[in-house]
Image (spheres, rainbow, N blue to C red):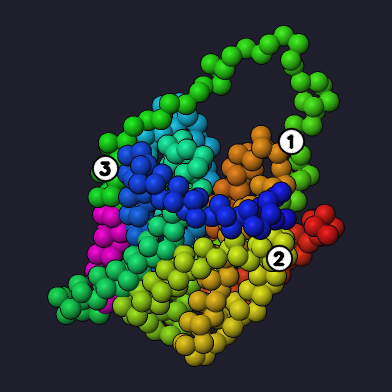
Amino acid sequence: MSLVSGTSEPMIQQREPSKKRSFVRSFLKLPRNVYLLLLFTTGKGFQISLSVLTLNYYVHSLGYRPDFIGIFSAMPAIGSLLSAVPVGRLADRIGRKPVLIMTAILTPLFLAACGLVTSAPFLLVCAFMQGVVSTAYWVTNLPLLAESTTEGQRVGVLALNSFLLLGIGALGSLLGGAIPEFVSDIMHVSAASTVPLRWGVITAALFTFVFGLPLWFLREPKRINALEQPPAVPGTEAPAEAVSRERWPVLLFLQLLIPDLVFTVGEGAVVALIQIYFVLRFHLLPGPLGVIFTISGLAGGVFSLTAPLFVRHWSKLRLITSVQYLTAPIMLLIGFSPLLPVAIGGEYTRSFMRTLIEPIYAAFALEQVSDKQRATLSGFYSVTWSIGFSIGPAVGGWLQSNVSLSMSFVFGAICLLVAPTLLLTFFGKKAR
């Protein structure tokens, strides 16, 4: 399934320089909205990586076991699952700018609350609410970027947005390790104690708030309301057969979503708790932990840009399933490795492979349905992510507390063997 259709290689080579010059010129002339949104995405990336590194570590410093930390890690995804559709409808009704500003204010509020409370019920409630309010970013950011750019600018801007979120934002892990170390030196306590880690969580919250302040200067793009569409010209109605073809392909949706749900559950069981695993297995302090995951996130973000090169030589389905099959033994390597360098190498390999197939997986799924069904499918993928990162961390935390630290990786590896098998069962014959 080539991304380039009906174009010869010589034509591509002749037009490539002009396309590059055209994109550079168009990027320098982007609307103010785009720069403001990309700036907020950068702060959001720092907040995510910083909080991922310090928040579970903070809860661990309070004396909670991995089974509770797994449930705690699942609460934001549960909040996102329950609020995604209502928040999306709210954004369509009152506009995306006020909803995005709301998340820039409320997300740091509830994230800071997570770092200030200590009792289990309050921790769970704050984590749940943090997931509810942070959903507004995922619901509004990409639509605003798409509506603020031309067709020629859009792909490049969305790719840059992803790189800022996953690549540059990964530098927050470095801060997540440095801030507790800095505070611990001042207070003469361990960097793994509660107060230094609390400052790491609060700093993560401040990133979203500070980088969100410029959002007040956003301009709400004009959108055509469905109710304002011109009436159809008599005699141009689509035939009944064409209308029936646009009905929901329920079976196709299930074939796409079930493998993704299995894959996401396996990822959630490992990724959501990977920092705590390194702390418990190798007794790492925040500083070294931050360096490890900064390199992982930054290099993974850069590596994701190579996805088009792989698609030129292999089909999307072959790439997706091969990478998932190969990731399963890598998860086992991480979970059972007695040596820190081997575990780090396994985690880097897993991260690179995961970011490689991220855009390929999305493109493959969207190519299976019609244009009118792609937005609906994207919404359902958001739901499968929320469910997967609700179930996965809860299962992984329980396994680490009641069986062994390595069993969450076994569970994740099994899921990563089942998911590609389902994809090949459903789509293998079509891809031949």
SS for callout 3: helix
**How many residues crowd around disc 2 within 10 Å: few (fewer than 14), some, or many (20 or more)?**
few
Residue at the image point whose x is 57% and y is 55% from the top: 14
Q: Which residue is mark 2?
A: 314
User: Would you say 9 lies left or right of 106 here?
Assistant: right
Residue at the image point whose x is 27% and y is 36% from the top: 217
Point out the tag, 3 or 2, that comes first from the N-terminus. 3
Marks 3 and 1 in Cβ contact (< 8 Å): no
Residue at the image point whose x is 48% and y is 72% from the top: 274
Whether residue 403 is visible, yes or no, is: no
Q: Is residue 257 magenta?
A: no
Q: Give the label, 3 or 1, closer to the camera.
A: 3
Q: Give the label, 1 or 2, closer to the camera.
A: 2
Residue at the image point whose x is 79% and y is 32% from the top: 245
User: Would you say 177 lies left or right of 233 here?
Assistant: left
Q: Which residue is mark 1?
A: 248
Q: Is residue 206 magenta?
A: yes
Marks 1 and 2 in Cβ contact (< 8 Å): no
Identity, as a three-letter code, of the amino acid under mark 3: Pro
Question: From mark 3 to mark 2, how far is it between C-alphas?
Answer: 43 Å
Instruction: Point out the stretch of residues depicted in magenta.
Output: 191-207
User: Would you say 117 lies left or right of 89 here?
Assistant: left
Q: Which residue is mark 3?
A: 214
Point out the tag, 1 or 2, that comes first from the N-terminus. 1
Identity, as a three-letter code, of the amino acid under mark 2: Trp
SS for callout 2: loop
